[in-house]
Amino acid sequence: MLKIDKINVFYGRIHALRDVSIDVMPGKVVSLIGNNGAGKSTLMYTLAGVLKAKTGSITYNGKALEKEAYKVLAQGISLVPERRLLYANLTVKENLLMGAHLRRDKIGIEEDIEKMQKLFPIIKERMKQYAGTLSGGEQQMVAIARGLMSKPKLLLMDEPSLGLAPIIIEQVFDTICELRSQGITILLAEQNALQTLEISDYAYVMETGHISLQGAGSELLNDERVQAAYLGVATKSIEEV
């Protein structure tokens, strides 16, 4: 569904992504794990059309990925950004409508808002409330719902558990599994390696802008190098093992 082939991305002179190659199969949860600064968000923003790769290629469903954000969205790829980035001075419903701004099917949009209320019951209670007044967990639910309002085939999720209470994190990961069961493909970037690998069909480990390890989620969960670096089982890093 998505093929990233040896892309290189720069912030000025900083080489942020180095020959990164990733494959995402349809209907799967594919994850990127790694510490803060590993390059996960850079990759997400490159896919979303916010940043540009200097070299390498990205294809989506066999075609070159568009390079402008609104065209990427029109292709069927939606980003749920790190820290939610909701429109604080708009209501929950207005935020959801912003997620559907490329659509013209008014009836379908209203039907999908109802679907979001069923997927996230708290949304139904908060529709007229300003997004900036919601709790962190409530904001995350709205951010995911907003991302879904464009009816994406591929959902990019950047650190969805960041700053949330453990019980809310469980709800977020349950939601990811529910979306997969509905046929939505998900590329998930997370520092929460344990819970991420538990639900991932396939995963990549990112370190300082490159892919250092990859495999099925269950395999990486039991890999000594991953346990050493991210699960607190040992003290050696991946590159030291």
Image: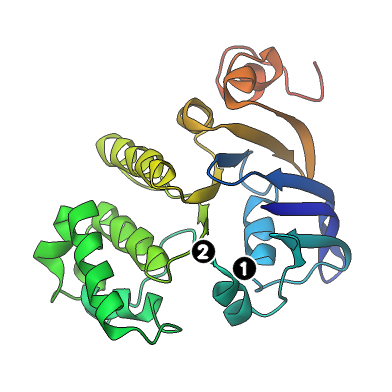
Name the amino acid, label 1. Ala
Who's the residue at 55% across and 67% down the image?
76
Above or below 131: residue 47: above
Please state if 229 lies on the left or on the right of 54 as rendered.
left
Characterize the local packing of mark 1: few (<14), some (14-19) or many (20 or more) Cα atoms within 10 angstroms.
many
Q: Residue beneath label 2, please? A: 79
- Horizontally, residue 196 falls left or right of residue 45, namely left
Return the residue at label 1.
48
**Secondary structure under badge 1?**
loop
SS at mark 2?
Answer: strand
Residue 167 horizontal/vertical position (percent): 25, 35
Image location of residue 90, percent across then percent down: 26, 82
Q: Nearer the viewer, residue 74 or 126?
A: 74
Circle 2: residue type: Leu
* x 75%, y 60%: residue: 62
Rate crowding at label 2 as few (under 14), some (14 to 19) or many (20 or more) other CA atoms within 10 Å.
Answer: many
Q: CA distance from mark 1 to mark 2?
A: 7 Å
How many labels were placed on the picture?
2
Say whether marks 1 and 2 touch (CB < 8 Å): yes
30 above or below 95? above
235 vs 146: above or below: above
Instruction: Indicate the quadrant where residue 121 lies.
Output: bottom left
Residue drawn at 52 percent across, 49 percent down? 185
Q: Position of residue 52 (x, y in %)?
A: 77, 71
Query: What's the coloring here?
Result: rainbow
Question: In which image quadrant can residue 170 be found?
Answer: top left
Q: Nearer the viewer, residue 124 or 170?
A: 124
Q: Is residue 72 among what the camera can see? A: yes
For marks 1 and 2, the one nearer the N-term is 1
Residue 68 picture location, percent across and down: 67, 80
Position of 174 with respect to 118 (left or right) is: right
